Amino acid sequence: MAGSRSLAGARPLLGDSPPARCKRILLRAAEPRQQPRCRQDHSLLSAACCFISTGGGQRPPCCTKPWGKAAVDARGCRGVRNGGGGPGASPLPPPAARPRPHGNHRAVVVSRHRPGQRPRERIDRALKVYHVSIEEKYHRDPVPPIPELPSTTNYLFMKKCVRRNPVVPIQQQWLMSMLKLVPQSLMEGKDRQLLAEKLLQEIIMDYETSMRRYMVRSVLIKPDIEGLEDEEEAPLALLPLGLDFSRPWHNSFVQAKNKILSNLHILHPTMKALLDLGYAAFSTFLIVDFSSLRLKEPVDCQSLKTDVSLSCSKAEEKILSTWYQKVISLFTQKEALNGVKLDRVDSFYNCVATLMSNQLKELLRRTVEVFVKLFDPEDRNCVPLFKMELTLDEKKMEFYPSFQDLEEGILFIVNRIGQTLQNIQTVHSCLMGGTTTLDTELPNHVIGWATSTLKKSVRDNLEGPKEYFENYVERYGWLVDGTAQARIERFEAEEHSFDEYTAFIDEFFTHKKEILSLPQVVHFPMICLNCEDLKQGLASNANTFAERLMDRIVASHREENKK
């Protein structure tokens, strides 16, 4: 069967091009055979045509059996024998129902051998069709490139859309919680409410800005292209200074928490009862009631010190007779130590002592703060009104009490409040007959803050009285500092007429009249200044100098009359 050897047995030579391989196969198929078979010829031609249309190199699966008809298109070839099909072969549809070839490929149909048509003609026809298909393939229009999207415009548009998305507004209860953290003293005064509203609006704007920045950064990634160099998002708000959200503290926090649970006994029912007693007794109570201090008449500094000392003593007696007795009664009950182990009793009573100390310290601190608040420079309607006088003592004008004495008297009130409730026994020592007392001393920072604030306020409020006093010294100080005495002595040593004496005497009487016409009491925000003593002293000095000159004139006239 060498003469009927099929195309499948022909292997392409290394380096052959598809046209060369195709031509070699077709020429081989056209060689004369000893026993030519029409079906074999058709099989060879069909395989060659299929090889041409597919580019060559592989044998199509349909070329394994002889064909009666062959159809070759851009996707391969199919064929059936005349008069039916064998196993695995499907009949071709009629010509009208066959699918047309796609693209620029042409279908080559090889029919049965016709009489008078040579194999060489058929080969030439197949080569012609092959060359036409190759030429059309190379002249085909190139595939258009994928259009490039405008990346800059696209990013800016997407960013704009993301920023326009609605943002969940900040919850109102969060804002109210922030306001509760602000001390009440900072919420009072002029324009404080408007300032708080402005701050809340600023917080809301910062919140919405941060949320929109977060959405943009979470959804979009800025491409690294030209045109977006300046499109930088501002950095997000920094975390508050002083807050550490790192994890190294976690172990120490857990240890401290466990220590608190084991030593402070904060969840014991007796502790809750003790807290309730302290809240009921001290929530609206102060050691000294300063509410009506401004409504009273101007007070003397010494009188105020006495009143404060008396109020502190009475408040201490009241606390010992009411709150302290209730606390002792609470711990004398059998249920007071329920659930407390014997080895933790001392720790439990230490916790009780600490809680009682904190309650009393808080009471003292609130009383001091209320007193210091009276001297608020922005609200002088509550400042206590103190009595002061301008006096003339031994030819010296001065304040009584002095500025130093007034400042010490005001600071004495803070110290006296801090000395209250310093000798209260602990519950354990009271039950066991000990002498240990509670630690109720005011913290140093509270005393330091109160002292510095009061000193500054006193100095500021004494500026007005000081200027008024300096005005007295400037206008009438020469009457008491020896200047008037020296002028009179020079005047008497010289020779003057009666009219000159009269003019000099009138000058002293004029000053006397002017001094007596000045107000007796002058009011300042914190000082009620009484000037009567100084007025009388200066007027008396002016009158004394005038009488001395008058006596000199009388004496001169007597001497002249004797002559």
Image: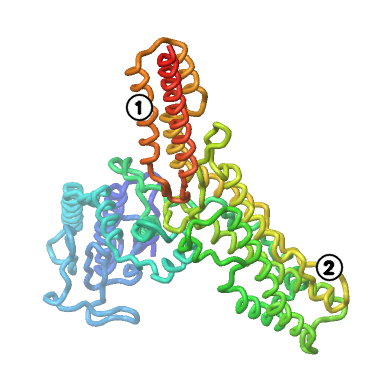
First reached walking from the N terminus: tag 1 or tag 2:
2
Where does residue 512 sit, x and y in percent of width and height? 39, 34
Residue at 84% x, 81% y is 341
Q: Quadrant of the N terminus?
A: bottom left
For residue 436, which numbered disc appears in the image?
2
Q: Along the line of sight, which residue is nearer the eye, 294 or 540?
A: 540
Q: Quick one: SS at disc 1?
A: helix
Dot 1 and dot 2 residues touching (CB under 8 Å): no
Side (left or right) of 420 relative to 481: right
Q: Which residue lies furthest to the front in this view?
A: 562
- At 51% from the left and 52% from the top, the residue drawn is 386
Disc number lying in front (1 or 2): 1
Residue 182 visible in the current orientation: no
Does dot 2 land on a helix, a strand or a loop? loop
Residue carrying label 1: 506
- Is residue 288 shown to the viewer in this render? yes
> Which amino acid, mark 2?
Thr
User: Where residue 78 sits in the image (x, y, percent)?
Assistant: 26, 71
Q: Residue 542's x, y, as percent?
A: 44, 31
